[in-house]
Amino acid sequence: MFTWSQLLIAGVVAVAFYATELVVFLFASAKKVEPDNRAVEGLREEVFELKSQLAQLQKELERMKEDNNTPAPYAQAIRMVRQGIGPAEIAVACGISKGEAELIASLHKTKN
């Protein structure tokens, strides 16, 4: 069985491989034939989208690494903060003090 982080890494590698293959294909076809501007623009958009997905996967991988390096109640508290749950509820659910929950909330709030 694979962990989420292993699957995420495999996905990042697959996206990177696909993007590299796409770039190689673009350079090979540019040397052989005059490119169709619509096709090139479509490929550029696809490469841009793949780069965006890769960046999102890398951010998620960093979050997962952070969660794996954090003691269990604090990792749960961080996940709850990201879900928008308040410090008082987090403190009760995780068995930590309200001050700790407020600190975690202030450090890990996502910007909307």
Image (cartoon, rainbow, N blue to C red):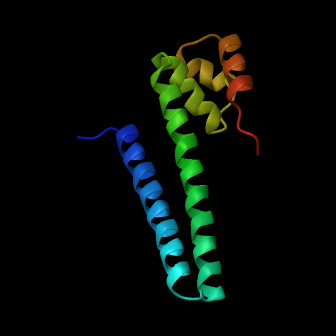
Q: Position of residue 107 (x, y in %)?
A: 71, 24
Quick one: 69 or 13, which is closer to the camera? 13
Q: How many marks?
A: 0
The picture quadrant where one finds residue 93 is top right
Placement of 42 over or under 90, stated as above or below: below
Residue at the extreme left of the image, as rendered: 1
Tell me where residue 36 appears, x and y as whole percent.
61, 89
Viewer-nearest residue: 25 or 89? 25
Q: Position of residue 43 (x, y in %)?
A: 58, 75
Q: Say which quarter of the image contains residue 100.
A: top right
74 or 95, which lies in front? 74
Residue shown at 46% from the left, 19% from the top: 72
Residue at x-position 41% and y-position 50%: 13
Side of 110 where 53 appears, left or right: left
Residue at the image point whose x is 61% and y is 39% from the top:
83
**For the point 37% across and 48% down, which residue is it?**
10
Q: In the shown orientation, is residue 3 left or right of residue 71? A: left
Q: Is residue 69 above or below residue 30?
A: above
State the quadrant of the N terminus: top left
Depth check: give the residue in front, 58 or 104: 58
Q: Furthest residue to the front?
A: 31
Q: Quadrant of residue 79?
A: top right
